[in-house]
């Protein structure tokens, strides 16, 4: 079986192209693939990739999506809301929508049910899917895209089997790339999720390419002994990026909790020179994982690790590979 481990910078350079559609997994405080969003911005600034008009699909624009909007690399969004959950609303997303800062983006609003249904359709290779939601209010209106992305948002039809009930037909979503953060994965791409799966079962499977960010790499024996934990089978995964604390400041259940203090600070510093200073420090100033971890701080990492959800991972810790072994496997990967 193939070793699918890949360096973060290599993965971004290999998979991310301008005007592609990217589905980012997790939820505003949980398992967002924030390190991948940061690396897109880093590689773009270095000139290793050139992106400006990405089509971003995210179940709630939170930390990662907000940074992408702030740096002006997103042209179009499909989402359910823009928020950092209990930490507060996304100031950046709101400024883009209401004021066109830093640019006006096209935005399509979905309900939690309609977005998950559209991802399910994509995963099942269906051009559309029936849904009981999507026939009321804003959810039935015209989509916000223009040019080649113009389509009637939902088509409402009557039940052909005679009940008289009206049903919405939702267009399937087929992201060019799906990126999901998981606490554990093996080198073959089997992704393990502890806690809520949110949209990620269908979001991962709907993507034409799938990249996982894993806090820790585990022995494949764990996947064999606990196949019920394998939320994303390796057969469809194109790359696994080992990056501990890759969801920070969001949580990764079983590994660390969310950093509400940092997220609140980010919200307060989401405009003007304060935002620029934040991005310069937390996105562009580091060059290695060690530097990234030093930026978070050892005391903060220890505090985030000591959270109630850590019990989820207790039965499985013996399968976590030592860091030096993971590095050897990463170096040996041919990609």
Image: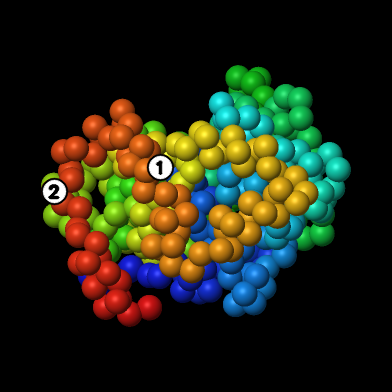
- Residue linked to disc 1: 300
Quarter of the figure with the N terminus: bottom left
Q: Distance between the residues labelled 2 and 1?
A: 24 Å
What's the colour scheme?
rainbow
Tag 2, which secondary structure?
helix
Tag 1, which secondary structure?
helix
Q: Which of 35 and 16 is in front in this view?
A: 35
Residue sitting at x 36%, y 54%: 244
Residue sitting at x 80%, y 53%: 102
Q: Which of 148 and 64 is in front in this view?
A: 64
Give the side of residue 49 with respect to residue 105, left or right: left
* For residue 194, above or below residue 66: above
Give the side of residue 67 with respect to residue 117, left or right: right
Are the two marked residues, 2 and 1, in contact with CB atoms closer than 8 angstroms?
no
Q: Please provide percent x and percent y for residue 128.
A: 60, 45
Q: Can residue 21 be seen in this view?
A: no
Residue 169: quadrant of the picture:
top right
Q: Please provide percent x and percent y for residue 5.
A: 33, 68
Q: Please provide percent x and percent y for residue 297.
A: 42, 49
Lower position in the chain sequence, tag 2 or tag 1: 1
Which is in the foreground here, disc 2 or disc 1? Answer: 1
Q: Please provide percent x and percent y for residue 234.
A: 31, 59
Q: Can residue 38 be seen in this view?
A: yes
Crowding at mark 1 (Cα within 10 Å: few <14, some 14-19, many 20+):
some
Disc number at residue 68?
none
Residue sitting at x 70%, y 55%: 276
Quarter of the figure with the C terminus: bottom left
- Residue linked to disc 2: 318
């Amino acid at each position: 079986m193939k070793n699918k481990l890949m360096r973060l910078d290599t993965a971004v350079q290999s998979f991310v192209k301008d005007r592609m559609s990217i589905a980012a997994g997790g939820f505003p405080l949980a398992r967002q693939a924030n390190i991948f969003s940061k690396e897109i911005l880093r590689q773009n600034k270095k000139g290793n990739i050139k992106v400006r008009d990405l089509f971003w699909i995210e179940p709630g624009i939170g930390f990662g999506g907000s940074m992408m909007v702030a740096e002006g690399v997103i042209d179009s969004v499909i989402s359910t809301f823009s928020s950092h959950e209990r930490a507060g609303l996304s100031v950046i997303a709101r400024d883009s929508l209401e004021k066109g800062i830093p640019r006006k983006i096209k935005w399509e609003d979905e309900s939690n049910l309609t977005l998950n249904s559209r991802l399910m359709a994509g995963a099942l290779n269906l051009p559309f899917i029936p849904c009981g939601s999507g026939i009321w209010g804003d959810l039935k209106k015209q989509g916000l895209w223009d040019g080649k992305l113009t389509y009637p948002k939902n088509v409402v039809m009557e039940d052909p089997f005679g009940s008289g009930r009206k049903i919405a037909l939702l267009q399937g979503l087929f992201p060019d790339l799906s990126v999901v953060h998981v606490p554990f994965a093996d080198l073959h791409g089997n992704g393990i999720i502890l806690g809520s799966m949110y949209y990620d079962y269908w979001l991962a499977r709907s993507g034409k390419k799938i990249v996982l960010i894993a806090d820790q790499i585990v022995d494949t024996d764990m996947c064999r002994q606990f196949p019920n934990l394998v939320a994303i089978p390796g057969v469809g995964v194109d790359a696994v990026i080992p990056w501990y604390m890759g969801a920070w400041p969001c949580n990764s259940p079983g590994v660390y909790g969310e950093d509400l203090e940092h997220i609140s600070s980010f919200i307060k510093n989401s405009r003007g020179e304060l935002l620029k200073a934040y991005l310069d420090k937390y996105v562009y100033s580091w060059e290695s994982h060690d530097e990234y971890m030093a930026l978070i701080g050892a005391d903060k990492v220890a505090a985030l690790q000591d959270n109630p959800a850590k019990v989820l991972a207790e039965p499985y810790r013996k399968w976590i590979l030592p860091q030096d072994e993971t590095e050897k496997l990463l170096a040996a990967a041919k990609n």
